[in-house]
Image (cartoon, rainbow, N blue to C red):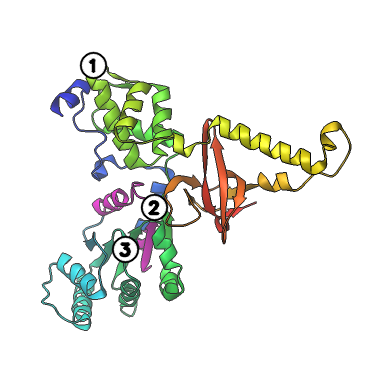
Amino acid sequence: MRDYLEFFGFKDDPFKITPDSHYFFLSESHQEALSSLKYLLDSEEGFAVIIGEPGTGKTLTVRKFIDELPEDVEFAYVLFPNLSPEELFEAILEDFGIKTQGETKNRLFGKLRDYLIEKRSKGKRILVIIDEAQNLPIETLEELRILSNLETSDMKLLQIILLGQPELEEKLSSEKLRQLRQRITIISKLRNFSEEETKAYIDYRISRAGNGNVKIRPKSYKLVYRYSLGIPRLINIIMERALMAAFLDSSHEVKPKHVERAVESIGLRLERRKLSRSTVYVAVVTVLLAAFLFLGGRELIGEKTKPTTGVEEQFEEVYVSVPMLNMREGPSTEAEVVYVLREGDRLKVLERGPENWIRVLYSEGDLRVEGWVNGKYVRK
């Protein structure tokens, strides 16, 4: 590793995947999330929620926020929240340095309440931050709502930040948690980087590591974006291995072949996310043939007739109406995510499936991705 860093003239590894706020990159959505957390702190709001797919930078964003906390703020950070209410209270108290000895939930709640009152009387503000909060059981989330009710005559005793994957938003939308959902006034969603942001992110990380002696070809940036889908963690993994491939070639230039080697080494494949050209040709010919047979060949030989609706429906265009939308391999939230769409992305409807699910095609440049999305998150 030392030879690798010395070869490129880096002071530090620019693409390490461990969260380091020194490398925090302010994309548009990350700036929005950080601003939302700062607003929570300055206001008397009780809850903030940050939503993002794995690898989009939720933990790094909150670490950047923590680094900038004023001295009058104390916080507890819970990392593994698949906990019962009692276990969660114990974890929070332990992070605040308060010992517990298997007390009941009510006793634990009372201890935490007394601690919050004492700290507030000394002018302190208290935060509880829970990472991977999609794993919290329903009953534990409901206890957090009750905990957030603690307040004096003019201010809350506690503010809570939940970080989680999109499943957290689905869970919070359930009927059982409607009261908690009403308390959440700050929801911010982290999106994948655009192609431009991906390039800027790579350049930024290299600059922070010492602006070493390395050059990246324009096509290499594009390949990293295509394979990573703009997910920061994947960008880091691909770039680290691409730099290593360049190092092994004694090259200070990251070429497309180095990115391809990096991708191959971690088993990423773009082909499964794309419609092959032959598949598209077959689909088009099939549709045209169906139209010809349905019309009896009249339109194709020049006879005037009304256009059919079948082909139009097959290629109906819709737009993503939410900040971030998962495209999945099948019509289920359990199916693997094959791409993450952004608000305003244009989609072609290929098939309507069960419930609200639709199979769609997204294309941008030479990238073509086919998959299933929930139809309630798109508009015409």
Q: Provide the residue designation for mark 3.
A: 135
Residue at mark 2 to residue at mark 1: CA–CA distance: 38 Å
Residue 154 point in image, percent of width and height: 34, 77
Q: Residue at x 38, y 21 (%)?
A: 217
Work out how far the residue at label 2 is from the one at label 3, CA to CA, in angstroms: 14 Å
Residue that mark 2 sits on = 52
Quarter of image, res 232: top left
> How far from the left and from the top, in percent, is residue 347?
59, 44
User: Quick one: label 1 or label 3, which is nearer the N terminus?
Assistant: 3
Q: Is residue 196 left or right of residue 162?
A: right
Callout 2: 10 Å neighbours few (<14), some, many (20+)? many
Whether residues under marks 2 and 3 lie with C-beta atoms below 8 angstroms apart, the answer is no
Question: Badge 3 local density, few (<14 within 10 Å), some, or many (20+)?
Answer: some
Corner quadrant of residue 255: top left
The reply to whether residue 207 is visible in this rendering is no
Give how far across and how far down residue 318 sits, in percent: 62, 48
Of 51 and 313, the residue lying toward us: 313
Task: Tell me the residue at 34%/71% (across/down).
Answer: 141
Look at the image and say whether residue 362 sits in the magenta stretch: no
Q: Amino acid at mark 1?
A: Ser
Range of magenta residues = 39-68
Q: Residue 67 at what x, y percent from top left? A: 24, 51
Q: Amino acid at mark 2?
A: Gly
Q: Secondary structure at mark 1?
A: loop
- What label sits on residue 250 in the rendered view? 1
3D distance between C-alphas at marks 1 and 3: 45 Å
**Residue 145 vertical placement versus 342 (above, below):** below
